[in-house]
């Protein structure tokens, strides 16, 4: 009986401590509000490694307004491609964060970066998993040309170690 009481007291202390140290749930800030401007369906014109293809991107704000969820479908070099991403703002780091998963890799790509409001430019840097098991540092830039047009570029290291534009996507929002 004494063991049971001691265990119950320990559990009570643990629960009380958890209540005292529990943080308030995250609340969307002004950076998260910016995500709403991207919601909708966007047609993608893709240029990658000398080839053109098409795709569709759907953006939706979710998870209590904290995350911009994205779902991309298209093709690259005649192969079907699907990807999903989630972008948020980390107030502690004062950086945007993104997690990306897709049908060409079993590992996620995690990136972080900044948003230049004056130039309407999001710049993210991450490590992209490569087929041979290595990672490649990539820089992804998204420029909002106007409310319904965005230009995305991905730059990574080429075979000679110099920056190489791996992909460029022009997005046009479909009318609502």
Image (cartoon, helix red, strand yellow):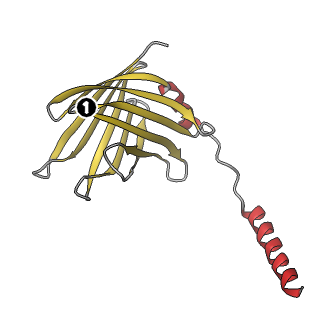
Extreme residue toward the right, this view:
1
Query: Which residue does the image show at 70% across and 52% down from the upper left?
Result: 24
Extreme residue toward the bottom, this view:
2
Q: Is residue 25 above or below residue 1?
A: above
Give percent across and percent down for residue 4. Answer: 85, 81
Q: Is residue 172 above or below residue 63?
A: above
Give percent across and percent down for residue 19. Answer: 77, 62
Q: Which residue is mark 1?
A: 168
Report which quarter residue 11 is drawn in: bottom right
Mark 1 nearby-residue class (10 Å; few <14, some 14–19, many ≥20): many
Give percent across and percent down for residue 31. Answer: 53, 37
Query: The N terminus is located in which quarter?
Result: bottom right
Query: Which residue does the image show at 20% across and 33% down from the upper left?
Result: 77
Query: Which residue does the image show at 55% across and 36% down from the upper left?
Result: 32
Q: Is residue 81 left or right of residue 29?
A: left
Query: Which structural element holds mark 1?
Result: strand
Of residue 128 and residue 90, the one placed in the foreground of this image is: 128
Q: Is residue 10 left or right of residue 59?
A: right
């Amino acid at each position: 009986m004494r063991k049971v009481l001691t265990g119950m007291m320990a559990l009570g202390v643990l629960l009380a401590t958890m209540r005292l140290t529990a943080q308030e749930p995250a609340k969307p800030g002004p950076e998260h509000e910016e995500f709403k401007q991207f919601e909708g369906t966007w047609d993608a014109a893709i240029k990658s490694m000398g080839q053109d293809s098409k795709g569709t991107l759907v953006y939706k704000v979710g998870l209590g307004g904290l995350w911009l969820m994205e779902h991309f479908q298209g093709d690259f070099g005649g192969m079907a491609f699907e990807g999903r991403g989630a972008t948020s703002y980390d107030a502690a780091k004062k950086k945007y964060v993104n997690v990306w998963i897709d049908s060409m890799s079993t590992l996620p790509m995690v990136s972080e970066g900044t948003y230049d409001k004056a130039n309407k430019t999001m710049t993210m840097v991450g490590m992209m998993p490569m087929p041979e098991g290595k990672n490649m540092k990539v820089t992804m830039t998204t420029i909002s040309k106007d409310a319904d047009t965005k230009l995305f570029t991905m730059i990574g290291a080429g075979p000679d170690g110099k920056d190489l534009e791996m992909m460029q996507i022009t997005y046009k929002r479909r009318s609502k």
